[in-house]
Image (cartoon, helix red, strand yellow):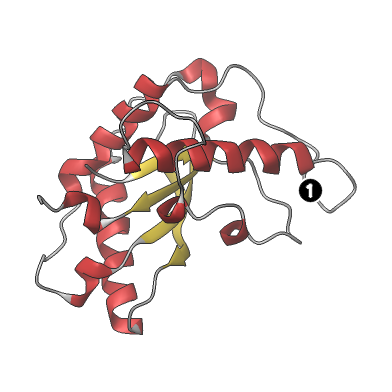
């Protein structure tokens, strides 16, 4: 279990990115017969939110007028991305930050390296210090493991150039 990642379409300035979908609160679709996998559900929810955001782009609501084009990332490609970040994500299990889920957003260049700043999109309840600590751990994981680029297919650049990734320490715990 690790961070969940999904490409996100460029959001319109009038629609905050955090309003898209809270992957931490994602639930399986009605009638799903597979066992519950919170990470897979979070990825699916984020992908659905990205598709909804892409549909809004270019409707005169201040969007960039460019929707992501090309085939979507496969589940295997999303999993490979998540697994590429997982080894760099370190959270102290005894800290308050270990109870905070954060979603971060960032942009990747064509070589799948982080371009610009990693930003906090949303966080679950916690003190300001705990949210900051959780965000810093997520930011370090992305920057460390992405220093030589992430394993993403170049032909799908439009699908993965804008990323929102959810770091949920609860998924890391063994029950």
**Which residue, as the protein is rendered here, is positioned at the far right?**
60
Q: Where is residue 153, by image quadrant?
A: top left
Q: Nearer the viewer, residue 63 or 74?
A: 74
Task: Kindly state the secondary structure of the residue where label 1 is placed.
Answer: loop
In the image, taking residue 12 as reference, residue 30 lies left or right, namely left
**Image position, residue 88 (x, y; %):** 18, 47
What residue is shown at x 34% (from left), y 62% (from top)? 101
Q: Is residue 98 above or below residue 174?
A: below
Q: Nearer the viewer, residue 15 or 38?
A: 38
In the image, taking residue 73 as reference, residue 19 lies left or right, namely right
What residue is shown at x 10% (from left), y 51% (from top)? 175
Q: Is residue 151 above or below residue 118?
A: above
> Does any portion of residue 116 appear in the rendered image?
no
**Image position, residue 51 (x, y; %):** 65, 35
What residue is shown at x 39% (from left), y 26% (from top)? 33
What residue is shown at x 24% (from left), y 69% (from top)? 99
Quarter holding the N terminus is top left
**Image position, residue 120 (x, y; %):** 45, 64
Name the residue carrying label 1: 63
**Image position, residue 44 (x, y; %):** 48, 35
| Total residue callouts | 1
> Does any portion of residue 168 appear in the rendered image?
yes
Q: Residues within 10 Å of mark 1 (few under 14, many from 20)?
A: some
Q: Is residue 146 above or below residue 73?
A: below
Q: Where is residue 76, by image quadrant?
A: top left
């Amino acid at each position: 279990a690790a961070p969940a990642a999904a490409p996100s379409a460029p959001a319109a300035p009038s629609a905050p990115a955090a309003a898209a979908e809270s992957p931490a609160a994602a639930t399986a679709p009605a009638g799903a017969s597979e066992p519950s996998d919170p990470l897979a559900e979070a990825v699916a929810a984020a992908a659905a939110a990205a598709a909804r955001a892409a549909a809004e782009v270019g409707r005169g609501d201040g969007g960039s007028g460019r929707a992501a084009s090309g085939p979507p990332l496969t589940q295997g490609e999303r999993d490979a991305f998540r697994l590429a970040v997982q080894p760099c994500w370190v959270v102290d299990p005894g800290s308050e930050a270990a109870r905070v889920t954060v979603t971060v957003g960032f942009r990747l260049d064509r070589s799948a390296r982080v371009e610009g700043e990693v930003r906090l999109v949303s966080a679950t309840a916690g003190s300001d210090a705990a949210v900051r600590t959780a965000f810093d751990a997520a930011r370090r994981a992305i920057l460390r493991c992405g220093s030589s680029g992430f394993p993403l297919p170049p032909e799908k650049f439009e699908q993965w150039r804008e990323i929102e990734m959810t770091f949920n320490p609860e998924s890391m715990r063994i029950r």
